[in-house]
Structure formats: structure tokens, C-alpha cells
Amino acid sequence: KNEVEQSPQNLTAQEGEFITINCSYSVGISALHWLQQHPGGGIVSLFMLSSGKKKHGRLIATINIQEKHSSLHITASHPRDSAVYICAVQIQGAQKLVFGQGTRLTINP
Amino acid sequence: NAGVTQTPKFRVLKTGQSMTLLCAQDMNHEYMYWYRQDPGMGLRLIHYSVGEGTTAKGEVPDGYNVSRLKKQNFLLGLESAAPSQTSVYFCASSNSGRAPNNEQFFGPGTRLTVL
């Protein structure tokens, strides 16, 4: 079993819909990262959080440490949000990240 | 600032050939990483470095070697390429290995095909 599991693996939605991507992990962590990989391949960091909630524009990330679960929400989704969203965790005491398999999001106009 | 750059962007090798991938960062980051990305799998760490002159093995180090002779550069070498090493390779760097300063900045990737 992977230490980091994302769901769903693929998600297709219509423009304007509210999107939720989930990430569950099975180990103790010091931080959780959400990243976005564009169709061209580039990877950018969206959020790093260790508790609570962060918001940037239409993106919101939440984490529940007790439940070992994080969610990434996109409000008023747009075709330009189409990308692969990757969850990664930093295991406590380690200096490396462990990555989920990614969720491929497609937003249709 | 260019951020993290990788060369080359694409390469095709024959089995048994060798090559070196170069990663360069201009953010004065201490930590640098090499990952490979394969279909259906998450990014997997090959090797990493916590500072100039240091290297350490990651999750999938076999068949690869690395060097960090200069702080800004991290080289990934394949001594004898195998078809199983066909992948997209990403380099990343971060200021630290621990939160909250461990946001990783990624290069654009190198697509390697081994025939």
C-alpha cells in the first residue's frame, strides 16, 4: 500500500463546478504539499501546510492531521485548471517528500 | 532569475550508452533532488543532496550516479542506459529539507528514451 493515496485518479467536470481532490496518508508527517503539473509537464508548488487551511485565489487546501487527510478544492473551475494535481508529504524526521500518484483533472468548457 | 533549469530537454539513447543530465539552480538552495516520473506512478526520488559535496540515495538509486561539485549544479549520470530507465526526469531544489522552508522548485524535466 502506498503511503500517500489520492482520489479520484481522474476527474472530468464542467466549467464552473466546485472541485474536490482528496489525499490520505498513513504515516506521521511534518508537512503536506500540493503541486500542480501542467499539460506541458512543468510542476509548480501550490500549497504547503501542516495544519488548518490555506487559500490562494480560487484554490483552497485543508488538512486534518488527526484523520491523516487533506483536500484541495477549486471553486468556479475553469478549463485552465486542467492539470495533474499531486499531493506529497514530508514524513516526520525525514528530509524528503513522498508523492501520491496524482489526480488528472479535466475541465470542459 | 531562471530558477531551476535542466539540460537536455529530450534525449534518445541506445542500450548501453552513457549520458549526464545537468540541473542548475540560481536560488542558492542547499538541497537538490533528482526524480523520475513514470506513467501511473508518483514522482520517485533517485538521489538527493543536502549541500555542496554531499549526495545520498533515494528510493530508486540503482543504475544512476550523481555529483554535486558546485552548490548550484547537480548532475545525474547513467553509466550504461537500460530501457527501464526510459522516463521523464525532474530536478528540484529547496532551501531546506524540513518544513517550513522545504518548498521544492522544479525544473522543466528531461524526457529520456532508451531503445
Image: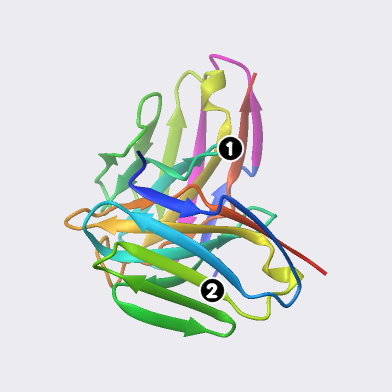
Report which residue position mark 2 lands on.
A73
Q: Disc 1 to disc 2, how far (Cα)?
A: 24 Å
List the residue tagged with mark 1: B39
Residue at the image point whose x is 61% and y is 33% from the top = B112
Q: Is residue B104 above or below residue B76?
A: below
Q: Residue at x 33, y 37 (%)?
A: B59
- The span shown in magenta is B10-26
Q: Amino acid at mark 1?
A: Pro
Q: Quadrant of the N terminus of chain A?
A: top left
x, y percentage for residue B101? Answer: 30, 71
Q: What SS does tag 1 mark?
A: loop
Asked whether residue B61 is in view, the answer is yes
Q: Is residue B3 visible?
A: no
Relative to B34, residue A103 above or below: below
* Same chain, labels 1 and 2: no
Q: Is B14 a magenta residue? A: yes
Find residue A84 and report its horizontal and vertical position in percent.
60, 56
Query: For residue B9, which quarter of the picture?
Result: top right
At a point 49% along the width and 47% down the height, the residue shown is: A101
Going by the numbered disc 2, the residue's amino acid type is His
Please report, as a chain letter, where disc 1 is located.
B
